[in-house]
Image: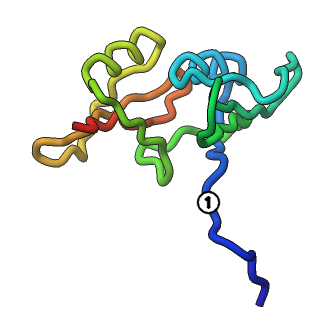
Amino acid sequence: MVKNGGVLQIGTTVMGVGDLGRAVSFWMQVLDYVPKRPVAADDDFTILVPRSGDGAHLALDLSETPVQQYPRVHLDLYAADQSVEVARLIGLGATRVDWDRYPPDPDFVVLADPEGNKFCVIDKS
């Protein structure tokens, strides 16, 4: 048995996208992230990192796989003021998803990025 000598932690979440440039632009604005390395016109993969400080990385990978109606993995974005953030994200190109699996009195809103990838905005209060 191989031991890793410590506790594992998630460093990067990878998301498939159909238009890398559009996805990079959207997620940079949403998260205030920057590319880890310059993005070239012919790139099919990039990693976005926090503009300052530590934090999880978001990798965007060119994919031909269709978006799932009920994704098995998605991002939860925590918001101090959920309604303000939802409005900001919609202004950046996100769309509100007509989610049929909301529980009574949910603390989250389901949105989709311009690629159709679903994510949640969680009310931290």
**Mark 1 surroundings: few (<14), some (14-19) or many (≥20) residues within 10 A:** few
Q: Position of residue 92 (x, y in %)?
A: 47, 11
Q: Mark 1 falls on what kind of element?
A: loop
From the viewer's perspective, is 4 left or right of 83?
right
As drawn, 3 above or below 76:
below
Instruction: Residue 56 in the image: state x and y as whole percent.
Output: 60, 42
Q: Which residue lies at the image location 74% right of the left edge and 75% below the top edge?
A: 4
Q: Quadrant of residue 43?
A: top right
Residue 28's place in the image compared with 70, above or below, is: above
* Residue at image coords 31%, 37%: 122
Nearer to me, 107 or 72: 107
Position of 7 compared to 35: left or right?
A: left
Q: Name the image quarter holding residue 94.
A: top left
Q: Residue furthest top?
A: 91
Q: Choose top left, top right, bottom left or bottom right for residue 89.
A: top left
Q: Residue furthest left?
A: 104
Amino acid at dot 1: Gln
Q: Nearer the viewer, residue 114 or 66?
A: 114
**Of all residues shown, which one is farthest toward the front?**
53
The location of residue 78, given as percent across then percent down, is: 37, 36
The N terminus - image quarter: bottom right
* Residue with the mark numbered 1: 9
- Locate the C terminus by quadrant: top left
Towards the viewer: 72 or 33 = 33
